[in-house]
Image (tube, rainbow, N blue to C red):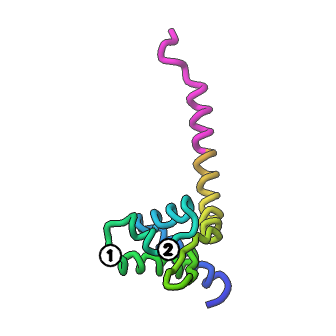
Amino acid sequence: MTGAGAREAVEDQVFAALANATRREVLRLLRDGGPQPVQALADHFDMRRPSLSEHLKVLRDAGLVSEQRSGRQRIYRLEAAPLAEVQDWLHPYERFWRERLKGLGELLDRMPDDGAT
């Protein structure tokens, strides 16, 4: 796969990774707490460590986290670049809604107040 098709496949992986609440929470933990070993992340969830490892694999495959071995531990770090691509994709929709809300605000400003006689 080359060009646009490859980029779309990567975007699909990122959106699929973000679709799961556990994976979004892992990203939040890494954003707020910095790089962390698997066990520190696992302590935040009521699931077996192999289940969390599956979530980490999805995040790693999407490029949202990186893994570094330190002795017997695996340290995970947030990789935010794919999130910037998601933000770029969402930006036109944000602009669309901002313009719609501005139009609504202008309409409401032109309407008479309820207490007007």
Q: Which residue is drawn at 62% across and 32% down?
A: 106
Residue stretch in magenta: 100-117
Q: In this view, does 46 lie to the left or right of 103?
A: left
x then y, percent, for residue 86 = 60, 66
Q: In front: 99, or 15?
A: 15
x then y, percent, for residue 108 = 56, 29
Label drawn at residue 37: 2
| Residue behind mark 1 | 48
- Tags 2 and 1 in contact by the CB under 8 Å rule? no
Q: In this view, does 107 lie to the left or right of 45?
A: right
Task: Decide whether residue 110 is among the magenta residues.
Answer: yes
The overriding secondary structure of the stretch rendered in magenta is helix
Compared to residue 78, the image places residue 72 above or below, namely below
Label drawn at residue 64: none
Compared to residue 69, the image places residue 104 above or below, namely above
Secondary structure at numbered mark 1: loop
x then y, percent, for residue 49 = 36, 77
The amino acid pointed to by label 2 is Pro
Q: Residue at x 45, y 63 (%)?
A: 25
Q: Residue at x 59, y 44 (%)?
A: 100
The amino acid pointed to by label 1 is Arg
Q: In which quarter of the image is residue 84?
A: bottom right
Task: Decide whether residue 116 is among the magenta residues.
Answer: yes
Whole-angstrom CA distance, mark 2 to mark 1, is 15 Å
Q: Which of marks 2 and 1 is nearer the N terminus?
A: 2
Q: In which quarter of the image is residue 66?
A: bottom right
